[in-house]
Image (cartoon, rainbow, N blue to C red):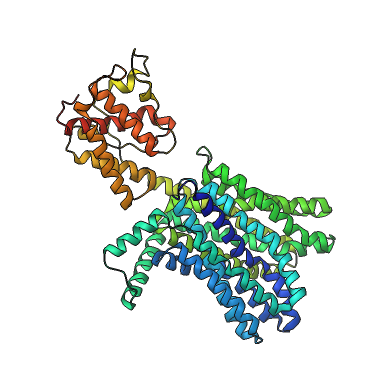
Amino acid sequence: MAGKGYSYVVVVSALMMKFLGPSLSYVAGVYHVALMEQYEHVEVVAWLGSIFACMFDLTGPVASLVINSYDCRTCVLLSGVLGMLGFGASFFTRDIRLLFISYALVAGLGTGFAQGGCMVSIGYHFPKTSSIVSGLVTCGTGLGVMIHPVLIQHLLSQYGLHGAFLLNGGVMFNLCICAMLLQPSPFETQRKNERLQTGRKRVSCRQIVQHLRENGVQFFTVLTNTSFVMLAFSYLCFSISISTLYLYLPDFFYKSGASLQDSSLVVSVSGTGSMISRILVGFAANDTSIGSAVLYNCLPSLVATLILFLPLFSLSSVRILAFGFLTGLYTGGQFVCLLPLVLDTVDVKMLASGIGIMSFSYGIGTLIGPPIAGLIYVKSGQYFAVFIFSASMMFLTTASGFCSTVLRRSKESRSRPTEATPEAEPLEANMGCCLGTSGASQRCCQLPTRASVPCRPGAECVHSTPLLVIWSYLELRRSCDGPLTADEAAMFKCDIGFLWQHSGVHLCGVNDGLNGKDEMFNLLIDRFTEMEADFPKSTADTDGAYFVQVLCNALWYVTSHETI
């Protein structure tokens, strides 16, 4: 995780990535009108806008390849360059066939790289608070939905289609600034150091092939995870439903007697509800009593129920706007819950591949959903059948999401090791102040209370070799912050030396009336507090205390003292 001060820079930078990159896909409709005025090929223009709008999701696996081969900063940097080149080339292009390359493919690929780099970087930097951070960052998309259409329409009216393309390329080029502000995460730094140690310094054709093979293995490994496959299918169903709903909703209200202004405003109002939802769901999902899975599985059912009562909302302007707001309120949270669910389902080393596959699933749903809905409309001749299809996809989203949750928790319960019952007696220093023993130090009860640190050392290891000290410390750091970095390894050596120096004969019981071993226990507590290696409140006096006991016993043992 980024430092406490710099973490704010990472969050703001990621929010701007969402604003400058993926949210541009929502201006495809604005460009569509301008393209129709210049080119008469209706179907060709429709495909041009559709491909550009879907590229930010369809290119997810390609963005994952870049992230796995290099890092998130490189991926976002490429997005700014591709966006500038794509929109810049469109300024000089007059042939619509070339626009498929410059506008739809290159510029669309730029929005996809920004999407992938942004979400994966948040997962790398904030694995424990990904729900809150994701909720704040994805508000950048909602902000872009409100600002970009108005901005692009103004540019079109002032500078024309190709002038707007050129200026839009300049807007996307600002992604390079966001990329430079994106500090590499500890996981990316460790991965880079490992590659340097193995001699992988230069990029050659052989190493490119090796990167492709490694990414292929990662994608295959992720796809063998049944829980993840069900989650991806759930996200596919959600994208089919939401793309169908937003495409046909304005026309349904207009043909039901609403004004053209009210029919168009329903989508904008849904953007407001979506922004509010992303913030609220982010905080709710971070609550362990609720969690991301509950919200992800329940919200689509609410949307589906709302869609079934859609005819009742077409009777007045207020009801139309209320439907748009509620739709955004109940759908925006899905995008927030995605990142923490992927983190729960796959290992952090495969996060980029997981996000890439999920983005690709969403893009496929956006691509095939409207045509299927259009076919249903042609066969039935009424919009209500289309919305029944959309509601069915929402219910299927809930069902498949619930199956993913059950499979994941079933796998976790099978893989969870059985904890050994501690046989060692608890230290007097740990229980003294809690039981009100006279003269005991109050520090021993001030166990840290923030992070979740599982304690798995067995009692049979208490009187083991000095390796127990190393193992215990590595377990603590791995549980808190992921794999041990080079800096943390150096800090570990200093910490062990510090504890060794201040153990045993140097602690003779002169402080607070405690004996030497009790003071060592308190010293460990103080040291963990300084390192912010905390224990949860619910287990601080049980698992947390036992963990410190094991480490204290090991230190006492290796310094040639008698064990208890």
Q: Residue drawn 40% across and 60% down? A: 222
Residue closer to the observer: 108 or 440: 440
Figure quadrant of residue 538 = top left
Nearest the camera: 514 or 424? 514
Give how far across and how far down residue 306 sits, in percent. Answer: 70, 50
User: Is residue 409 shown above or below 520?
Assistant: below
- In this rendering, the count of numbered labels is 0
Q: Is residue 364 above or below residue 89?
A: above
Outermost residue on the top side: it is 438
Which residue does the image show at 39% across and 29% down from the upper left? Answer: 447
Q: Position of residue 525 (x, y in %)?
A: 34, 30
Where in the figure is residue 181, as x and y percent of width and height?
51, 59
Q: Is residue 413 left or right of residue 28?
A: left
Q: Is residue 23 above or below residue 100?
A: above
Residue 402: tell me if it is visible. no
Residue 363 shown left or right of residue 424 in the figure: right
Q: Quadrant of the C terminus?
A: top left
Q: Which residue is nearer to you in this view: 545 or 303? A: 545
